[in-house]
Image (cartoon, helix red, strand yellow):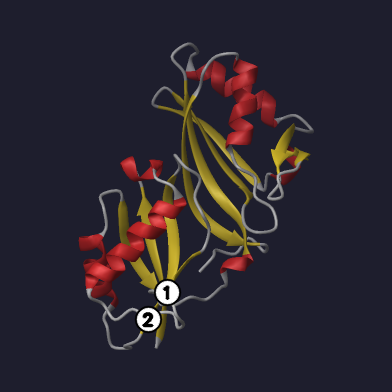
Amino acid sequence: MRNIRVWYKKYGSCRYISHLDVNRAVMRAMQMSGLPFWHTEGFNSRMYVSFALSLSLGFTGERECADMKLTEDDVDNSYVIKRLNECLPDGIKVYEITEPIMKPAEIAYADFEIVIKSEDLSSEIIYNKLCNLLEREHIFTEKKTKKGDIKQVDIKQNIAKYNMRLENNCAILEITLPAGNNLNVNPTLLTDILEQECKVQLYCDVRRGRLYNNKCELFR
């Protein structure tokens, strides 16, 4: 028995399918691949797969991962990548397989790149308004909890780090926010406030990148 962590990208039209649909697509690919994946035991046996962290609908995922188990130790990782990619839909692509080092419960932060533009405002104006917003001492907004309650959170106090730039007539924000079981701050909470500040519709392309633990060590 060998535990593996499968790293993949979610992009293109697949960013508009739900986490549940991604789960189904991956399990279907596992079945079609003919690889010796381990099945859970019990009456309703199925191939084991566990995703580290769900990705919001519409987001691109540059470094997503799922844990699986192989019943045979001598299956080459490159062959597993090849077979899975042959069975996965366009927009989900496996690019690496590693041994799991950290547990998904250790995930505490995630990197995001947000490309922002508008048909009504120049990128310079959006950039300046974003600068003004992020320079505030507090950025309060309402967030729904897992229990369905509404609570007020201060986004500014939850920003680990950020960087901004102008590129290709877009304002680009690179930001690291809490992500995981303990606290999850969706970057759209910030872009929604920015849109209110700009008073026009903004088009935001969100890409999630690397994940980290609470010591800001790369999740592996």
Residue 155, visible in the rendered structure:
no
Where, by quadrant of the figure, is residue 214 drawn? bottom right
The disc labelled 1 sits on which kind of residue? Tyr
The disc labelled 2 sits on which kind of residue? Trp
Q: On the image, numbered disc 1 is attached to which residue?
A: 48
**Residue 58 placement (x, y as % from top left):** 44, 39
Q: Which mark is residue 38?
A: 2
User: Which residue lies at the image location 34% right of the left edge and 45% below the top edge?
Assistant: 14
Asked whether the residues under the numbered discs 1 and 2 touch, taking CB atoms below 8 Å apart as contact, a structural biologist would say: yes
How many callouts does the rendering have? 2
Q: Name the N-terminal-most of marks 1 and 2.
A: 2
Asked if residue 136 is positioned above or below residue 40 in the image, the reply reads above
Q: Residue furthest top?
A: 120
**Residue 63 placement (x, y as % from top left):** 43, 56
Q: Which mark is residue 63?
A: none
Q: Residue furthest front?
A: 43
User: Which residue lies at the image location 48% right of the left edge and 51% below the top edge?
Assistant: 209
Residue 216 in the figure: left or right of residue 153: left
**Residue 66 placement (x, y as % from top left):** 44, 66
**Residue 146 placement (x, y as % from top left):** 68, 50
SS at badge 2: loop
| Quadrant including the N terminus | bottom left
